[in-house]
C-alpha cells in the first residue's frame, strides 16, 4: 500500500537548522508531487511547499522563502525538508503528503496519503 | 488568519446532521478550484475525507458529503457518531499566492 514514513522527533535551538525526511513506498516515487504541511501546537494546517520528485523543481510558501529547502533522493524514494534559522514559532508537527489529482489538473491536487508527522521543537 | 474561513466549532447530538462551511474568494474557490476536506482525529495525521468538492475516497462512509457553490463549499455529516468527533479542514488552491495551496482554519466537531 502507499505509505509515507517520516524521520523522528527533533529538538533544536533557535538559529539551528533541521532536516526532516519522508520515505515513500508502494507507488512510483517520481510520478507524484510531494507537499510539506506543518501544524503548530493547537493550531491549524499550514502549507509549506511542493517538490517534483522527478525533476527536483520546488515551490515554496512566500512566508518561508529563503528559509526552506526541499530536496529528493530518487535512489531511496525519499524527500527532505530543511528549515533554517529556526525560531520558537517554528515549533510544530511537520507532515509530508503526496499530491494526487487524477484526471483533474495539477492545481486541483489533494493530499493523500500523509506521513505520520515529525515533531520539531525549537527551544533554548 | 487563514485564506479560507471555517467556523471554529460545530456540535451535534448522535444521529443528527451537521454542516461545516468553508468560505473563500475569487482567487481560490470562486476561481473554480476544487475544494478538498480532511479529518484529523486527536493526535493523528490528517486523513483525506472528500476530494474534488464532492467525491469520497474508498472507505469513507456515505454519511460524509461535500458540495461547492460560488466562493464557498460545505461538508455535511449525517447520522453523527461519536467517532466523528475530530477537527475538519478544507483546502484549495489560490492563484494570488505563487503555487500556493491554502487551508481553512479548521473546525472542531463535538458530538454531544
Image (spheres, rainbow, N blue to C red):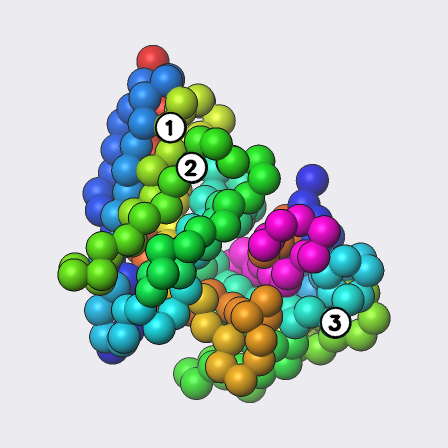
Q: Which residues are magenta?
A: B82-100
User: Chain for mark 3?
Assistant: B
Q: Is residue B62 left or right of residue A92?
A: right
For residue A41, above or below residue B25: above
Q: CA distance from mark 1 to mark 2?
A: 7 Å
Which residue does the image show at 44% across and 22% down from the upper left? A88
Mark 3: few/some/many CA within 10 Å (<14, 14-19, 20+): some
Taking the magenta stretch, the answer to whether it contains residue B88 is: yes
Is the C-beta separation of discs 1 and 2 under 8 Å? yes
Q: Which mark is residue B32?
A: 3
The residue where tag 2 is placed is: A68
The answer to the question of whether label 3 and label 1 lie on touching residues, with beta carbons closer than 8 A, is no
Q: Position of residue A18 (x, y in %)?
A: 30, 32
**Which is nearer the N-term, disc 1 or disc 2?**
2
Q: Where does the image place residue B85, in percent across and percent down from the top left? A: 52, 61
- At x 42%, y 83%, the residue is B59
Residue A84 numbered tag: 1
Left or right: residue B43 compared with residue A4: right
Coordinates of residue B109 in the picture (x, y in percent) = 60, 59
Amino acid at each position: 500500500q502507499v505509505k509515507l514514513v517520516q524521520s523522528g522527533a527533533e529538538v533544536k535551538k533557535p538559529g539551528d537548522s533541521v532536516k526532516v525526511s519522508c520515505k515513500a513506498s508502494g507507488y512510483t516515487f517520481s510520478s507524484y508531487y510531494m507537499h510539506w504541511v506543518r501544524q503548530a501546537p493547537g493550531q491549524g494546517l499550514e502549507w509549506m511547499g511542493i517538490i517534483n520528485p522527478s525533476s527536483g523543481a520546488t515551490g515554496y510558501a512566500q512566508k518561508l522563502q529563503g528559509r526552506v529547502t526541499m530536496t529528493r533522493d530518487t535512489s531511496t524514494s525519499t524527500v527532505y525538508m530543511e528549515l533554517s534559522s529556526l525560531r520558537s514559532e517554528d515549533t510544530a508537527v511537520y507532515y509530508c503528503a503526496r499530491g494526487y489529482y487524477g484526471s483533474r489538473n495539477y492545481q486541483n491536487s489533494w493530499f493523500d496519503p500523509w506521513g505520520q508527522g515529525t515533531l520539531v521543537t525549537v527551544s533554548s | 488568519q487563514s485564506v479560507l474561513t471555517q467556523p471554529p466549532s460545530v456540535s451535534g447530538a448522535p444521529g443528527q446532521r451537521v454542516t461545516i462551511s468553508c468560505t473563500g474568494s475569487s482567487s481560490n474557490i470562486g476561481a473554480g478550484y476544487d475544494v478538498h476536506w480532511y479529518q484529523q482525529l486527536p493526535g493523528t495525521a490528517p486523513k483525506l475525507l472528500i476530494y474534488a468538492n464532492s467525491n469520497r475516497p474508498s472507505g469513507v462512509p456515505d454519511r460524509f458529503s461535500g458540495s461547492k457553490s460560488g466562493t464557498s463549499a460545505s461538508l455535511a455529516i449525517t447520522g453523527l457518531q461519536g467517532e466523528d468527533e475530530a477537527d475538519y479542514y478544507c483546502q484549495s488552491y489560490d492563484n494570488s499566492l505563487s503555487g500556493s495551496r491554502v487551508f481553512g482554519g479548521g473546525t472542531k466537531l463535538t458530538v454531544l
